[in-house]
């Protein structure tokens, strides 16, 4: 019967294999741009990845230790029945071991306290309103069943004016500039999730929540909803486009605004934009 | 001991086998089949129907299956259908992922309209495009029923078929303020073309079905020649013709937009309030403050109570409980599909058909197909339409524009004197 322990050993080996292999596979590892599987594109991303690695190493070590102990105990103390049909070794009962219990409570508690203190600075930088950057708002993003509606302030830099630009599922920002958005929800709780930038923030009805992030690679990234918000949850996917330069962003915005101001099908002169 | 082992083995095996068998919903959904118009076999009040005409019903069904295929999984495309062709000139290949050739089925390099529709659209718009998918009852406004070929937000004249670009725009950008999401980030351009084709296909099929019912309604069940091939051909050609004509009827404003100066906005305001000689009735529906609460429609609270006040399928019961005046008004203000309507709240800057000036021009100049918004051209000229567009676009940012407008109660008095309000 002691060979049952091998099944447990197998499960442990698979699990350890999985996390040991993950860093060597772009698909298994953290979501990063293609071609640069170990480069996290945002400042917060790099901090969060460092925390993640610490936790992975800690939990990995604990996992290996506990699994080894589990398998060894199963193997060593499996019941054996002698030729007379009786157990070779009678079971022993004892009522707890204070020393053991103190050890296995204090070690995890210590680890948890360490993590709680160690991550506080990162948490504050990402989530505390007092840490929000003093930059103009890039856009107001409103989650609704089932899409992300974006409102950019347009050329005048102010939201709620006639030159605002409206897009759906289409977030644009500039490389290496901190993007500040105001996150809202029109109906239920959604979650604004930028996997490559390691940003996740719930959008709560009735609140305008500031969210800020940056990206040091130009290109196309993903936006998803990370809170099951209804039957169309999976449809809440958007494109995030990071422009190389501010000028490129402005050109995109100007082209979008021209289309938003279209008054004839083609070829006609566009009237001056609403600049009142 | 042995018994316990057997139990353990059985338990383990059953868990393993369940996992291996996987999950299948085949037993839940049943075969996917087109749903018939009720008028095909039942009496429908005030409409053409084929009740009591079993032979004509049979003919109509066979014709439909011959023309468009017996089930969504086997699509036939009638010659001359207004659908896309591929490089080899094959019609309707965007609809499916296989095409039947003399050598057998040939795999196509795309998912096909049906596959994409089934994944992204069917849950609301239904198998036959009737707007009756499983998630439809939860929505307001209800999803479009394609089977009449009518679409609200188009660039073509009121009542005309949409242009391809209109459907493309609706799928790509969605309809704001409704449950139609934007698919730009979910589908590629090519995939959107496939979906446009499939929606057109469902419309053609639905329109042909209705045409067959209408034709059969006036025919005698004993008549061997009823719904003969050449008659059917004519019907189908007339259905196709409407779609083919759409591209030539697109309305392009002949004069560019008037720059949105305060003067233009002020002129638009006078038009909106019906203070010009054209006596427009905008405020009658959209309200004196543009809040979508004009007296020509049922009161907002009553409307909300009826539409959102409980089980959607019990809405008729809630309507029946209204007083006679409200009930009468309710009946008058349904759309072409018999669904309740609400005039737009112009203060919210949410425009279902799009916020570009050209979109608003279309809404005002030619009204909204199937809804109560009437066409205003040529009642007012192009410049006046642009003034109105400028006013509507300015209103959300300058609500004070309507501050001194008559209060809703006073507007009601005005409306009572104006019979045109009760269209």
Image (spheres, grey):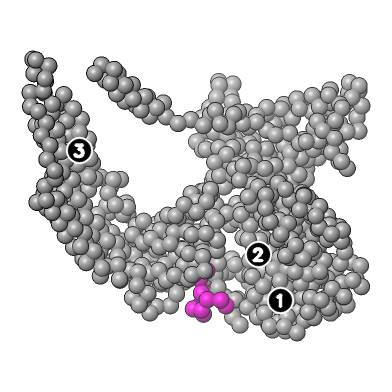
- Res. B206 image quadrant: top right
Q: Using the rendered image, report if marks 3 and 2 lie on a common chain.
A: no
Q: Dot 3 lies on which element? A: helix
Q: Quadrant of residue A74?
A: top left
Residue under the point 31% across and 54% down: A32
Callout 2: SS: loop
Residue A48: x and y in percent read: 27, 61
Q: Is residue A10 left or right of residue B26?
A: left
Residue stretch rendered in magenta on the structure: A151-161
Q: Nearer the viewer, residue B74 or B350?
A: B350
Q: Is B284 colored magenta in this rendering?
A: no
**In this orientation, which residue lies closer to the viewer: B159 or B329?**
B329
Residue depicted at 29% across the width and 65% down the height: A44
Check disc 1 and report the residue beneath it.
B391
Q: Residues within 10 Å of mark 2 (few under 14, many from 20)?
A: some
Asked if residue A158 lies in the magenta stretch, the reply is yes
Kindly identify which residue carries mark 3: A12
Task: Say which chain tag 1 marks.
Answer: B
Q: Which chain does the residue under circle 2 lie in?
A: B
- Apparent side of residue B177 relative to residue A69 in the rendered image (left or right): right
The subunit letter for the residue under badge 3 reads A
Residue lying furthest top: A83
**Residue carrying label 2:** B351
Nearest to N terminus: mark 2 or mark 1:
2
Q: Residues within 10 Å of mark 3 (few under 14, many from 20)?
A: some
Say whether residue B25 is visible. Answer: yes
What residue is drawn where x is 58% and y is 24%? B101
């Amino acid at each position: 019967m002691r060979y049952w322990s091998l099944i447990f050993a197998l499960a442990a080996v698979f699990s350890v294999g999985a996390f040991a292999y993950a860093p060597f596979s772009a698909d298994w590892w953290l979501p990063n741009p293609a071609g640069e599987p170990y480069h996290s594109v945002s400042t917060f991303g790099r901090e969060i990845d460092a925390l993640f690695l610490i936790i992975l190493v800690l939990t990995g070590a604990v996992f290996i230790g506990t699994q080894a102990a589990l398998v060894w105990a199963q193997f060593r103390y499996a019941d054996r029945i002698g030729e007379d049909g009786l157990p070779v070794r009678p079971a022993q009962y004892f009522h707890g071991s204070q020393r053991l219990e103190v050890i296995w409570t204090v070690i995890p508690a210590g680890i948890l306290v360490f993590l709680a203190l160690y991550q506080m600075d990162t948490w504050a930088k990402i989530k505390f309103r007092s840490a929000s950057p003093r930059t103009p708002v890039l856009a107001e993003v409103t989650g609704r069943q089932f899409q992300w509606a974006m409102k950019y302030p347009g050329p005048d830099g102010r939201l709620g004016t006639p030159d605002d630009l409206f897009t759906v599922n289409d977030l644009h920002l500039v490389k290496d500039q901190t993007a500040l958005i105001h996150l809202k929800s029109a109906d239920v709780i959604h979650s604004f999730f930028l996997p490559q930038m390691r940003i996740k923030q719930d959008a709560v009805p009735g609140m305008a929540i500031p969210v800020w992030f940056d990206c040091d690679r130009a290109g196309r990234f993903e936006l998803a909803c990370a809170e099951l918000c209804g039957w169309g949850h999976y449809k809440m996917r958007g494109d995030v486009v990071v422009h190389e330069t501010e000028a490129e962003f402005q050109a995109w915005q100007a082209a979008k605004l021209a289309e938003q101001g279209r008054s004839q099908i083609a070829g006609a002169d566009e009237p001056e934009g609403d600049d009142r | 001991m042995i018994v316990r082992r057997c139990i353990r083995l059985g338990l383990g095996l059953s868990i393993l086998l369940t996992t291996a068998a996987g999950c299948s919903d085949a037993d839940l959904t049943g075969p996917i089949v087109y749903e018939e118009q009720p008028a095909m076999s039942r009496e429908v009040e005030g409409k053409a129907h084929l009740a009591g005409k079993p032979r004509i019903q049979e003919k109509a069904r066979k014709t439909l299956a011959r023309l468009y295929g017996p089930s969504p999984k086997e699509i036939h495309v009638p010659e001359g259908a207004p659908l896309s062709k591929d490089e080899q000139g094959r019609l309707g290949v965007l609809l499916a992922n296989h095409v039947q050739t003399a050598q057998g089925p040939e795999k196509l390099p795309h998912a096909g309209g049906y596959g994409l529709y089934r994944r992204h659209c069917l849950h609301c718009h239904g198998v036959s495009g009737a707007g009756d998918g499983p998630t439809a009852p939860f929505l307001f406004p209800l999803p479009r029923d394609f089977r009449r070929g009518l679409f609200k937000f188009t660039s073509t004249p009121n009542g005309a078929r949409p242009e391809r670009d209109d459907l493309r725009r609706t799928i790509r950008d969605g309809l704001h303020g409704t449950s139609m999401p934007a698919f730009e980030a979910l589908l590629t351009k090519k995939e959107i073309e496939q979906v446009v084709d499939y929606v057109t296909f469902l419309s053609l099929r639905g329109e042909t079905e209705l045409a067959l019912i209408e034709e059969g309604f006036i025919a005698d069940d004993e008549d061997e020649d009823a719904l003969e091939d050449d008659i059917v051909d004519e019907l189908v050609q007339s259905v196709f013709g409407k779609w083919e004509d759409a591209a030539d009827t697109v309305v392009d404003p002949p004069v560019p937009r008037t720059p949105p100066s305060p003067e233009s906005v002020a002129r638009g305001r006078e038009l909106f309030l019906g203070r010009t000689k054209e006596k427009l009735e905008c405020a009658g529906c959209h309200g004196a403050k543009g809040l979508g609460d004009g007296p020509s429609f049922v009161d907002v609270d009553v409307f909300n109570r009826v539409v959102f006040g409980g089980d959607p399928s019990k809405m008729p019961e809630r309507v029946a409980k209204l007083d006679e005046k409200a009930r009468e008004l309710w009946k008058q203000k349904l759309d072409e599909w018999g669904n309740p309507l609400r005039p737009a709240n112009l203060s919210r800057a949410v425009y279902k058909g799009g916020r570009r000036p050209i979109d608003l021009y279309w809404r005002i100049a030619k009204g909204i197909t199937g809804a109560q918004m009437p066409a205003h051209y040529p009642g007012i000229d192009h410049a006046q339409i642009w003034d109105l567009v400028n006013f509507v676009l300015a209103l959300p940012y300058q609500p004070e524009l309507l501050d001194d407008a008559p209060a809703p109660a006073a507007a009601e008095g005005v409306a009572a004197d104006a019979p045109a309000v009760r269209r």
